[in-house]
Amino acid sequence: MQSLESFVIVVAAGKGLRMGSKTKKQYLCLEGIPILSRTIMVFDRCDQLNEIVLVVPQDEMAYCKKNIIEPFGFVKKIHLVGGGKKRQDSVLNGLKKVRDKKNHEKKTMVLIHDGVRPFVDQSIIKECINSAVEYGACIPAVKITDTVKQVFGELFVEKTLNRENLYKAQTPQVFKMELIWDAFEHAEATCFSGTDDASLMEHFGKKVFVVKGSKMNIKITTPEDLALGKYLLSIV
Ligand SMILES: Nc1ccn([C@@H]2O[C@H](COP(=O)(O)OP(=O)(O)OP(=O)(O)O)[C@@H](O)[C@H]2O)c(=O)n1
Ligand SMILES: C[C@](O)(CO)[C@H](O)COP(=O)(O)O
């Protein structure tokens, strides 16, 4: 049987416009540690992973080396890569780095994770890797538990959606390298863009397996999420 190697691409090249803070949200601290460093710590501890590809803004690579990576003594090899305009462009830059480093004797798995989801736990990471080895593509997601309204012009309810099959997608999204590479090439050729990586796989016509995510695995997007993140840290 072919042996496995796994890379995680942590994307952190966004502008954080919805957070509206002077310092980009990925660099904001939770209990003295930058959110992005906290996220890297989780993957640094994961024994099923080989190397980390960290995608950050093109002109902030030196800043990240000095403030996000070096102070924390990470054990795994971290490759710093410059990001792109959209999240999808940043992931593509990360995938190009994985392609360069890939060992052609081995089966390569790629995890793609938001740098601003520091509360992901080891059990979800492991379950996603195992399912992606079996099915090719796997994401964690949580079933929606509220009533969902479609709102017109952000003011009036247009209709209530059937929430039976609605889930919120999280990361890490895990794929066999050849599959996600082909899905990105297909997206580029067809000018398709999506807000997550699984949507490119869906567009490519491949099935994506879903495992149970966690409500704790929040994406820090707005100031409310930052407050929630502080609270989560205080209870764990
Ligand atoms: N061009 C981009 C855009 C986003 N991301 C990353 O993708 C993750 C999820 O994106 P989101 O939370 O939407 O971050 P931002 O794009 O920074 O936020 P906003 O849309 O509010 O500006 C973040 O870790 C973000 O840094 C990225 O690497 N490159
Ligand atoms: C990838 C993602 O985190 C899954 O929920 C999400 O799609 C990114 O969201 P964004 O707000 O569109 O960047």
Image (cartoon, rainbow, N blue to C red):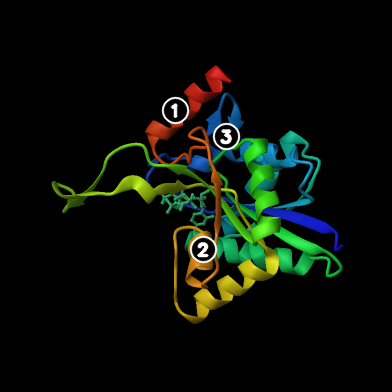
Disc 3 marks which residue? 119
Tell me residue 56's x, y (percent).
Answer: 59, 53
Does the closest atom of ligand 2 sit within 8 Å of the Cβ of label 3? no
Q: How far is disc 2 from disc 1 in space, using C-alphas? A: 27 Å
Tell me residue 13's x, y (percent).
Answer: 54, 54
Q: Earlier in the sequence, mark 3 or mark 2?
A: 2
The answer to whether the residues at label 3 and label 1 have Cβ atoms under 8 Å apart is: no
Q: Earlier in the sequence, mark 2 or mark 1?
A: 2
The C terminus is located in which quarter?
Answer: top right
Q: Residue type at mark 2: give it.
A: Gln
Residue drawn where x is 76% and y is 48% of the image: 49
Disc 2 marks which residue? 88
Q: Earlier in the sequence, mark 3 or mark 1?
A: 3
Is residue 84 visible from the viewing direction of this image? no
Q: Residue type at mark 3: give it.
A: Phe
Instruction: Say above or below: 58 vs 151.
Output: below
Q: Residue type at mark 1: give it.
A: Leu
Disc 1 marks which residue? 228
The answer to whether the residues at label 2 and label 1 have Cβ atoms under 8 Å apart is: no
The answer to whether the residues at label 3 and label 2 have Cβ atoms under 8 Å apart is: no
Label 1: how many Cα within 10 Å (few below 14, some 14–19, many 20+): some
